[in-house]
Amino acid sequence: MGKYTIVIHGGAGDFPKDSPEELKQQYINSLTEALNIGKNILANGGTSIDAVEKVINYLENNILFNSGRGAVFTLEGKHELDASIMQGKDLSSGAVAGVTIIKNPISLARLVMEKTPHVLFAGKGADDLGIQLGVEIVPNSYFHDSTGYQKWLKSNIKQQGETVGCVALDQYGNITAGTSTGGRQNKMPGRVGDSPLINAGTYANNNTCGVSATGIGELFIRNTIAFNISALMEYKGYTLKQACDEMIYKRLPEGSGGV
Ligand code: GLY
Ligand code: GLY
């Protein structure tokens, strides 16, 4: 009792060499704020599921990151968001893929887990479920970052890596992992990445670890990255570091992403 742990990421992308110091500082400040939100919940006896949801809500609402507001653009210049959450105590999990009007996809993923008998909702059915369950609804244009949009119009590129994720272990020994993203810049409409897929982009098991991935989703799906890290620990006795090194550095091509 009394011990807790929290880890966050804001994507595996790197800063372009010419990025202003001020922008880097904004990212660092935002990540620090996110971490503090989670730490406060856990230090006061809150649960890992609450910590993970609130941390990711903050990052979803922050335009710097590729999740919620500030999400990257599909080939059509729209936004389709993916998120998932999983609890290590009982493997319960919830996810949404390709939502377009849900302000905080991670919160709808949690409701899928808690309020439905299912794990994953996609597209219009997921948006409709959000309306039905009373989560905050926004127009698709809410997610636009106008600076990012101007860049997208001009060059069709924007930094790609800023998927967000959080893993927390609460004072009761329960691990929760969550991931939220706008996916990949210029993805084909309807494309779904690893982030809403339990076992690929997100996994949690109290016997082993919690994982949230970021990077080129297709590679994380094909290699079942998040589950395999846990499985190497559970079945082969690897340490967390050994398991991550095996999957990230040996199985994936260099530069695929991280966990
Ligand atoms: N295995 C088929 C289904 O769950 O829909
Ligand atoms: N890893 C985020 C994505 O590919 O959608």
Image (cartoon, rainbow, N blue to C red):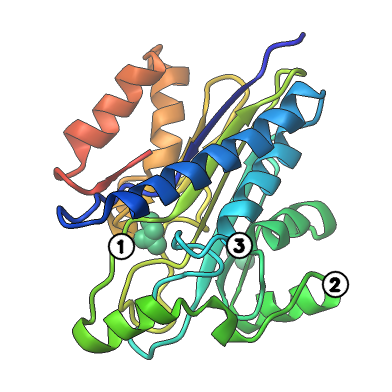
Residue 27 in view here: yes
- Report whether 131 appears left or right of 146: right
Is residue 76 placed above or below 127 in the rendered structure? below
Q: Position of residue 101 (x, y in %)?
A: 64, 80
Q: Residue at x 49, y 80 (%)?
A: 144
* Amino acid type shown at disc 3: Asn
Secondary-structure class at tag 2: loop
Q: Position of residue 98 (x, y in %)?
A: 53, 74
Q: Earlier in the sequence, mark 1 or mark 2?
A: 2
Disc 3 versus disc 2: distance between alpha carbons?
Answer: 18 Å
- Report whether 35 appears left or right of 38: left
Q: Residues within 10 Å of mark 1 (few under 14, many from 20)?
A: many
Disc 1 versus disc 3: distance between alpha carbons?
Answer: 18 Å
Q: Residue at x 50, y 37 (%)?
A: 8
Q: Is mark 3 within 8 Å of ligand 2?
A: no
Q: Which mark is residue 134?
A: 2
Residue 89 in view here: no
- Report whether 110 appears left or right of 169: right
- The quarter of the rendered structure image containing the N terminus is top right
> Which quadrant of the figure shows ligand 2?
bottom left
Front residue (pair 207, 50): 50
Secondary-structure class at tag 1: loop
Q: Which mark is residue 61?
A: 3
- Report whether 142 appears left or right of 37: left
Q: Residues within 10 Å of mark 3 (few under 14, many from 20)?
A: some
